[in-house]
Image (tube, rainbow, N blue to C red):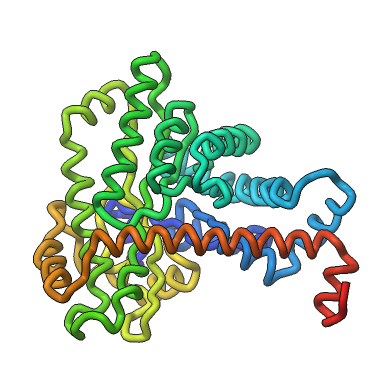
Amino acid sequence: MNATLKLKALGQSLWLDDFTRGLLEDGTLARYRDEYHVTGLTSNPSIFLKAIRDTAAYDIDIAKAHATSLSDESLFFSLAIKDLTQAAELFLPAHRRSKGVDGWVSLEVSPRLTEDAVGTVAAAKTLHASAHCPNLFIKIPGTTIGIVAIEEAIFAGVPVNVTLLFSREQYVEAANAYWRGLARRRDARLDLRVASVASLFISRWDTAVTGEVPFGLRNRLGVAVAKQTYGTYRERMLHPMWRELAEAGASPQRLLWASTGVKSRELSPSYYVEALAAPDTIDTVPEGTLLSFATRGELISVMREDGGNADPVLADFAHAGIDVAALAARLQREGIEAFRQAWAELMQVIAGKRMPERHLNSVAGGKP
């Protein structure tokens, strides 16, 4: 039994945190589904920037839109939805087998809407409706303003992947927003089958404190935060409010591990995947991490439902001068800014490729 199959047997879903059109066209994504038990896929502005900027796969489609009235942003979403709905088709069997719990792909709203809850909800509704896809999540950041939008989107029946969560407290806010949206649907006598996942980012914690903590604490903060959050996630499954919603037909908002690619040479490529093995969760992995874990990874241990040794480890970080709450807020702000920058560059790339003459001159080093 290979390592990915062991995760499946444990009750953890493995999703690809990577995407290019080539993965679809050459059959690689289908092979990952069949051989490595991948049952979903996530995307974000940085992933699409790399896919569109660094390959020619989208050049013809972008150039064809040269004379249309579509904005660069609208053109991007049309391309992204086209590709993601094809990917979603590959995972539709898993979606159906799991009765909507698994088999999802994700598309993020424009980072330009980060400070606009009303605009975020409107965009989420539009993107979800235009895709005509039963297994497409719309990603909304779990910021203070995003939490408002998440509740409204759930109430509107839009499946949401809450992204850019960095702490247990941020996760709880996102989970509460999901519950509130469902409760409002129940009170309005609407169907409660509106799915959601809450994405907790892991490896960025360890990168952020490199050089600031003793050697024995290096590369341990992300996993400790994950364990602490997992304990709270399991506790919430027993909460009376959740039991009422579940009895009315709701499905749990599953906890998802994001940012699981290693950033340190001190770690094995599958370090985070092995450390985050936990039932009833999702692990999203970059392509390189997937291949490494599938061929050389091991299922060493299973995360305890109470979070295990998370609290003593977090206490050690506090003793070392790390303010975890303040760092979580900073990491979320930095994540938002990184996606904004990637989005701005993505729009520039699309604008350049939309004007064939300008794009060719740029490639040749000439002036448009």
Left or right for 194, reference 249 = right
Left or right for 59, reference 140 = right
Does 138 sit above or below residue 287?
above
Q: Residue at x 20, y 61 (%)?
A: 302
Q: Which quadrant would residue 45 be assigned to in this image?
A: bottom right
Q: Position of residue 115 (x, y in %)?
A: 50, 46
Left or right for 255, reference 139 = left
Badge count: 0
Q: Position of residue 29 (x, y in %)?
A: 56, 60
Does 353 sit above or below residue 271?
above
Residue with the most extreme left position: 312
Q: Which quadrant would residue 225 be assigned to in this image?
A: bottom left
Q: Residue at x 12, y 60 (%)?
A: 308
Q: Position of residue 256 (x, y in %)?
A: 35, 52
Q: Residue at x 83, y 69 (%)?
A: 359
**Residue 29 can be seen in this image:** no
Q: Which quadrant would residue 365 be assigned to in this image?
A: bottom right
- Residue in the foreground of this view, choosing between 237 and 292: 237
